[in-house]
Structures are given as structure tokens and as C-alpha cells.
Amino acid sequence: MQFIEANGARIPAIGLGTWELRGRTCARLVEQALRFGYRHIDTAQMYENEREVGEGLRASGIDRNDVFVTTKVWTTHFAPNDLERSVKESLKQLRLAQIDLVLLHWPNPRIPLSETLSALANVRRLGMARHIGVSNFTVALIEQAVALCPEPLVCDQVEYHPYLDQAKVLEACRRHDMTLVAYSPVAKGRIKNDEVLAGIGAAHGKTAAQVCLRWLVQQNVAAIPRTSRIERLSENIEIFDFTLTDDEMARISAMGSAKGRLTDFGFAPKWD
């Protein structure tokens, strides 16, 4: 496993996303992922699976200190007192003494960002979180958050894959020693039959998905592909034994556009 370093955090480059995973399936996938070598598990309060993620972690037998666990605070809990209570509930659900990374899941303009970030920073000071960050923040919001937060932010977690140009967000993160964590990194499976990615993969004996994930990691981006299939777990992590050329990296990057977003929750902020 390779690691991405950002503002004191050391984040495993490939993790398991758990959105839409529930019950025993979620616990089993987390357990198997950790046994396959994953050391980064991503969940969220909104996913309603923190308990199962914790169960999978314990069932794996992997030392807690070797696993990087991320969860995200939902927007309805952004008022200072609510945020702290919600993180305590996440700790209870996960059955952990500390969460490695706690993120704000989406911007919430109804609550002053300064108040929310102050509460998030306090969660870190109290030892409930080792690190803190944001998710789905635009470039403008990253700048505001960095200026307002009294503790360092380590990442912005956003949708990122070859079809979506996130160069501006990536640049903003780098300016502030943050990293970008990519969700939907294989474009919800749409890259499987992509001719460009498949062609590059053939040259390396890899799949289109592996090429896609390697493209992200070579940009110093962490990726959290979600899968409900155990056979995909090993495929997604076997990306550290080859390197894309500069030309291959450029060809993949050229596929992206500002209109390549696949996720529409109906409440996303206006992007730069």
C-alpha cells in the first residue's frame, strides 16, 4: 500500500467506499477488504452503516492502529452542539475510541461555516478525531474553510474520475497541503468498456478500472472505490505494480470535462 501525506495525515492511497452497502454484506465486504490488504475504510452517518463497518473491522483481526477509518457528518448536524453529539454517536456506532478522519459531508449554507468549522476543530482537539476535512467543497469554499478553520484540514473528498475535470479543486488542495480523495473513482463502472482505458490497460496487462485508479494515485490522489463484489476487491488494490507513462497520464486527463459529473443528489452546491 502507498500513502498520501497531507497536513500531518498519512492516508492509504486506495480505500473501500461503503455507500449503499448495508447489513451483513457491508460487514463482510469490510472484513474481506482488510484481509486483502486494504487499510482505508470510508463511511458516513448518512450511509447508516457505521455499525456494520465497525463489525467488519473487528472481524478482520487487523490491528485497529493499522486501519484508517473515515466518516462524515451529515448537514443536519452542523450546528456546533449537534456536530459534537453526532460524532460521539459515530464513535458509539463504530465502537471506536477515535476516528482517523471526520469530514463535513456537504456544504450547508444555512449554518455559518465558521461555527461548523470551529466545532469540527474542537472534535479534533477533544481527541474524537485524529484529522478533519471537508467533502464536496468547491474551490471558493476550500479557500474559506482553510481561512476559517483553527485546525488543519487534510482533504476535500469529491467525485473524481477520468470523465470529470477536477483540476481546479486538485490545485486548491495542493495549495493548502491538502489532498483530494476521489469517490466514484471508476465512474460507477462506466469506464469498463472505455476504449482509451482498455487500450492502455492492455499494454500493462491491467483492466480499465485498474488504469483509472492508477491514474488517480499517480496524481497523489487517494481513491475509495465502492464495490459489493468480493472479486472486485483484489482487482481494485492491485495497482501498485505498474506505472503509467506521462503520455498515458495526459491521454486519460484529456478525457475529462467540467460536465462529466455522474452524481446528482439534488442538493449539490453550484460548482466553480
Image: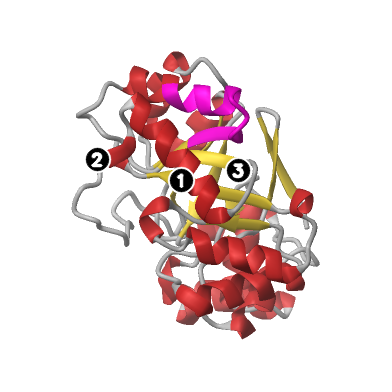
Amino acid type assigned to the residue bearing label 2 in the image: Pro
Q: Is residue 41 left or right of residue 255?
A: right
Q: Nearer the viewer, residue 175 or 88?
A: 88
Distance from label 2 to label 1 (Cα)?
27 Å
Give x and y (percent) for residue 171: 51, 33
From the top left corner, tell me how far across and down residue 184 is, in percent.
45, 62
In this orientation, does residue 52 appear?
yes
Binning the other alpha carbons within 10 Å of mark 1 as few (below 14), some (14 to 19) or many (20 upward) gives: some
Q: Which residue is mark 1?
A: 89
Numbered mark located on residue 99 in the image: 3
Query: Foreground residue, 236 or 218?
Result: 236
Distance Cα–Cα, label 2 vs label 3: 27 Å
Q: Amino acid at mark 3?
A: Ile
Q: Secondary structure at mark 1?
A: helix
Image quadrant of residue 5?
Answer: top right
- Element assignment for label 2: loop
Mark toward the start of the polypeptide (2 vs 1) = 1
- The image shows residue 253 at horizontal and vertical percentages of 51, 54
Whether residue 238 can be seen here: no
Q: Which residue is mark 2?
A: 269
Label 2 Cα neighbours within 10 Å, binned few <14 / some 14-19 / many ≥20: few
Is residue 205 one of those drawn in magenta? no
The answer to which of 195 and 128 lies nearer the viewer is 128
The residue lying at 33 percent from left, 23 percent from top is 113
Over which residues does the magenta segment extend? 119-133
Residue 168 sits above or below residue 71 on the image: above
Instruction: Tell me: 264 left or right of 122.
Output: left
Would residue 130 be found to the left or right of residue 240 on screen? left
Is 227 above or below relative to 149? below
- Amino acid on which the number 1 mark rests in the picture: Glu
The disc placed on residue 188 is none
- Image point (63%, 47%), residue name: 219
